[in-house]
Every structure is written in C-alpha cells, then in structure tokens.
Amino acid sequence: MAFEPRIVAFLCTWCSYTGADTAGIARLKSPANLRAIRVPCSGRVSPELVMRAFDQGADGVLVLGCHIGECHYDTGNHRTAKRLPLLRELMGFVGLEPDRLHLDWVSASEGERYSRIATEFVDRVRTLGPVHWRLPKEQQVEINRQLMANRTDTPFELNDCASKTDAIRTKARELLSSGQVDCVIGYEVGPRGKTRPAFIYDAEDVDRLVWNPDCVYNLTTYLDVKLRPPKLKELKPVAIVVKPCDSRALNVQLAESQFSREHVHVIGVTCEGVRNQKGNLRGRCEQCGHPNPVIYDTLVGAPVKSHPVPENPALLEIETLSPPERMEYWLSQFDRCIRCYACRQGCPVCTCPTCLYERDDSLWVGLGVGMNEKRTFHLGRAYHIAGRCVGCNECERVCPMDIPISLLNMKLAQEIEKSFGHVAGLEPVLSPVVTVLSGEYKEG
C-alpha cells in the first residue's frame, strides 16, 4: 500500500483560507490528506505549534499566509517570513528534513495557486516517506561513538592574572567608597578553593575579589534580580565584572530594556579564555572571535588581538550525518534530560518571569519527561533565544546531564548571521527575528 502522508496546514483566515475556499468553489483538485487549521494570521503560527504538529504524528506542515505587504495586521507575516525559515534550519539540524516544513503566500483570489502549492507539497512529503524517529539500538551506539572519538581538547595557557585582580579591586574600592554603586558583582575563591560569584557591599571586603582562569560564570544573570526594585527611583547603580561574552549579554539585556545603562557600571576584562574542569581551554573560548569587551566603563587588561574563528568541528560532524542519524543523535541526547531547568536558570537572556515550559496551562508542551516533551522543550528554548544568544554557553556548563545544548544555539547563530548579518550583543539592538522586514525577503 502506497504511503499517504498526514499534512497539517495552517491557513491565514483572511487570505489563504479564503484561497482554499476559492479553490473548492472552482472545483480545483486539492489533496484529501491535508488537514486545514484556520488561524487569525500566519504570524500566530509559533514554532511550538509546528513542533506540536510533528509530535502528534504529522508528516509535513504547510503554513500559508498573506503576501508580504498585504497582511491585515500590517506586519504579522513579516515575523512568519523571518522565523519559519529559521525553524526549518533548526529542525533540519536535528534530523527532520527541512522539506517537511513549507511556507508560502496565497491571496483570497488565488485558488489555483493554493491548489498547486498544496499538491506539490504533499507530493514532496510523500517522496520523503514517514518520519523515522528512532534507529536500531546498534546504530545509535555507533553514531555516538564516532562523534565522541573525534573530540579533542585544547591545552590552556596560564596567564598572569595578578595585575587584573589588583585593577578590579582598586576600581571596586573606589566605587564603593565614593558611594557611586551599591554593590560590586565579581568573583571570589570560596573556602573549598573554587571560584564563585561574589557580591561586595563594603569597600573593606574588596580584597575578596579575584580574577583567574576559573572565572567561568556569566554574572549578568544576576542583574535581572539586582536591578528590579519596587520603585525605580530608589535604585542605586550596580558594578559588575564582565568577560567579553558577558558584555555582549549586557547589550542584549539593554536592548530589551531589562534595565537602564546608567544603573550599571561595567568593569570589562579582556580575556584569553577560561578553562574547564579538566584544565583545558573551554570549547566556547575556542569559538570566540571577540576577546575584548564590547561595552565597559572601566577596562581591565591590555586589549587582546582577535583571531579567525575556526569552524566548530562538532557542528561539521553532525551535519555530515544523514537526517535519520542526526535525529537519533539528538534524541539520544535529549533522552538524558531530567527537565531540571538549569539551562534556563543559567542563561542571561532567559528573563521571562514565567517560562512557557513551566506553565501549568501551557498548550505547547507538558511538564513531564516524555521524549516528545523533552525534545520540544530544547528545540523551543533554542529558538526562543535565537538572535539573542551570545555564546557564553552557561546553559551547557550547568547541565548536569552533559547535553551539548550550545550546538543548537550555535547553529541558529550561524543562520541568523548569514541571513541578517546580525551577531547578538555586539550592539544594543533587538534580535532581527522580532523586527519587521527591511529588504531581507523576496517572494518567489
């Protein structure tokens, strides 16, 4: 028996849904295995809806909206035009063929166009066959073994950090003594010899502050709490020690109006990288092309010469796998997730007061630990910070299950830079995913 795909079609009520009606009135043939869902605007088709459709057994998802410039909500389809291609790339990276998700435009009078697009899409998905979610166990083990065998570590070159420590302490003492700031957020060495975040409120305590190769934390995560008082007029500025990647997170937070620039004194530290628990250079530092802070009030350390960023070998290896192999690799990673939300808690740009994935009434994904829920959580979270992720990789560092979450973020960052020329955090500007089109998209 020939395979017949199950297709979910999200149709804009004003144009494409009416275009489907026009096709029916004109007695034009349309695939019978297409299930139409009427939505107010194509801009309402969120990534969660698309992923939920695949979770529920769809073999393909078709999204049809108004032509660019004809949206009844002015710019609703601008968001669709930006985020659906990005979602295609993300789903393709994790093993779901990009051709299973298609975006197009149909007006109310284009019944023939609707019929043609729907028929061509169903034929394409029919050729792809059903979605293969899992591979045989033996093949799963072999894929993971091959990828792990090619991982190498770069030795860390220890630098003299004493002068930077002295400069940080001197500036912190000056700021606290003069009353310019209420608190200095930096690093200290705890009683067990491990470097940890420190909150200094008194000038007499600044000698606790240090700078060393183990200053891995992105301290900007704490600004969301420190700078959210009951009354803004009562707020005193806060000083914070930032690495270059942390300074980019500051720009993202400023662009999203998390706080005002005058409420933060930025002590930027030039960085040659930090080390991991094995004493080697952290992977995120190998891929960092910005060794100097992009925003600061006080600069600590001599500027570091930037160097070309090599392509991430892990990304390249995954992209050489076939779609079923990529899917199996990622499902085996997501399968270890315990939904502890450490990745979200450690992320400086995950600032929603109530996370979509923790709401009791969430229509997108449950709160359990089933494979579908875990997959939807990780892909959805990666998409939510697309164009905002600065590559600090705190999400991966704090993950107790060692899931390579950063690879998802890195893949989307590459796609956004390629499509929009945007690198998150270099300037205090919003992600292009949430702004209107400005010539990036051409129909046809």
Image: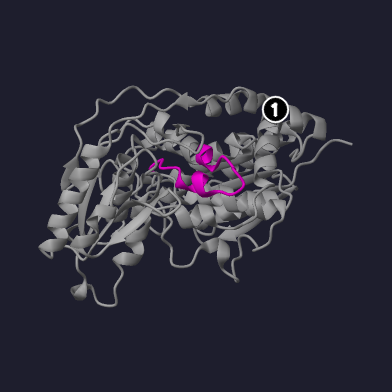
* Extreme-bottom residue of the structure: 230
- Residue toward you, 369 or 433: 369
Give the left or right position of residue 26, taking residue 290 as reference.
right
Q: Is residue 360 above or below residue 277?
A: below
Q: Position of residue 444 (x, y in %)?
A: 46, 33
Residue pictured at 33% horizontal, 38% vertical: 422
Question: Magenta segment range?
Answer: 390-408
Which kind of residue does numbered mark 1 sit on?
Arg
- Please say whether residue 392 is one of the residues in the magenta stretch: yes
Say if residue 202 shows up in the picture. yes
On the picture, is 333 further left or further right than 379?
Answer: right
**Quarter of the image that includes the N terminus:** top right
Residue 159 lies in the magenta-colored region: no
- Using the rendered view, name the quadrant where residue 90 is placed: top right
417 vs 64, left or right, is left
Instruction: Count neighbours of disc 1 (C-alpha within 10 A) and say few if under 14, some if 14 to 19, many if 20 or more.
Output: few
Nearest the camera: 182 or 140?
182
The color scheme shown is one colour
Q: Position of residue 145 (x, y in %)?
A: 70, 27
The reply, left or right, for residue 376 in relation to residue 76 is right
Who's the residue at 21% across and 38% down the image?
A: 163
From the viewer's perspective, is residue 50 above or below residue 100? below
Q: Please name the residue that numbered disc 1 is placed on.
A: 145
Above or below for 396 versus 227: above
Number of marks present in the image shown: 1
From the top left corner, tell me how far across and down residue 243 is, in percent.
30, 42
Residue drawn 65% across and 63% down? 366
